[in-house]
Image (cartoon, rainbow, N blue to C red):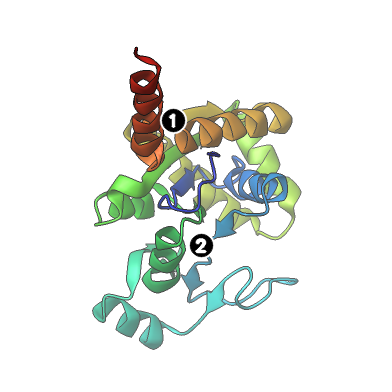
Amino acid sequence: MTQNDATRRGIGIILSSPSGAGKSTMAKRLMAWDPSLSFSVSATTRAPRPGEVEGLDYFFTDRETFGQWVLDGEMLEHAEVFGHHYGSPRAPVESALGAGQDVIFDIDWQGGQQIRNSALGGDIVSIFILPPSIAELERRLRSRGHDSDEVIGKRMAKSESEISHWAEYDYVLVNADPDTCEAELRTILTAERLRRERQPRLSDFVRGLNEEFRRRQP
């Protein structure tokens, strides 16, 4: 028996944070640590940024198509952020979890809330990542170099509201040091995989132990 027993359902790992606190970086680090993890690629109506790849970073689409996906129930969650629509396609996530594959979501609190309240809620582990300070949050946003002062101002204004939802999550981490934060995420994932209810062969294993006891009796 191993923690990655193929007969178990997969875990959906929600990573949320205010923009700049590190959820995307932590998602990439977790996937480098464990290549068996898959990433829920979001759909968005915003234009690709330099270097972003269709189907790898996002599924880029127009507002009309995105709206139709929502109406057809093909999105696990969706929200409008800074004038653009974002959402998680349902089909690939359900397929992965059913096959025992763990899936990482890099989404905001609104999306996380929708998924936790969905039929997949029992498969979900939610983690909120806080910045060590608001000053550091702004520094990280500016260091990325792809947002205007106006956009950074909007992100900073929105971060207070986002942080107010921290208590809705299963786990909350402070990303003061990326290496430490990554180690804590690894610990959470390992522990969640080992939860009794996620080890479907445990009952058979314990039944076998009891059979051994009976065979030892005179």
User: Which one is in front, 156 or 35?
Assistant: 35
Q: Are marks 1 and 2 in contact (CB under 8 Å)?
A: no
Q: Residues within 10 Å of mark 2 (few under 14, many from 20)?
A: many
Residue ID at (41%, 34%): 205
User: Which one is in front, 211 or 178?
Assistant: 211
Split into 4 quadrants, where in the image is the C terminus? top left
- The answer to whether residue 188 is visible is yes
- Residue 33, quarter of the rendered image: top right
Residue 148, x across and y down, in percent: 65, 59
Vertical placement of residue 135 versus 217, above or below: below
Three-letter amino acid code at disc 1?
Answer: Tyr
Farthest-out residue, front? 218
Label 1 and label 2: CA atoms lie apart by 20 Å
From the viewer's perspective, tell me whether residue 51 is left or right of residue 99. right
Which circle's residue, 1 or 2, is located before the other in the chain? 2
Residue 105, x across and y down, in percent: 49, 54
Vertical placement of residue 150 versus 201, above or below: below
Q: Which residue is mark 1?
A: 171
Residue ID at (73%, 52%): 144
Vertical placement of residue 163 versus 83, above or below: above
Q: Residues within 10 Å of mark 1 (few under 14, many from 20)?
A: some
Q: Which residue is mark 2?
A: 40
- Residue 213, quarter of the rendered image: top left
Residue 27, x across and y down, in percent: 61, 48
Farthest-out residue, top? 218
Residue ID at (32%, 54%): 115
- The answer to whether residue 131 is visible is no
Q: Secondary structure at mark 2?
A: loop
Q: Secondary structure at mark 1?
A: strand
Vertical placement of residue 23 versus 115, above or below: above
User: Which one is in front, 4 or 68?
Assistant: 4
Three-letter amino acid code at disc 2?
Answer: Ser
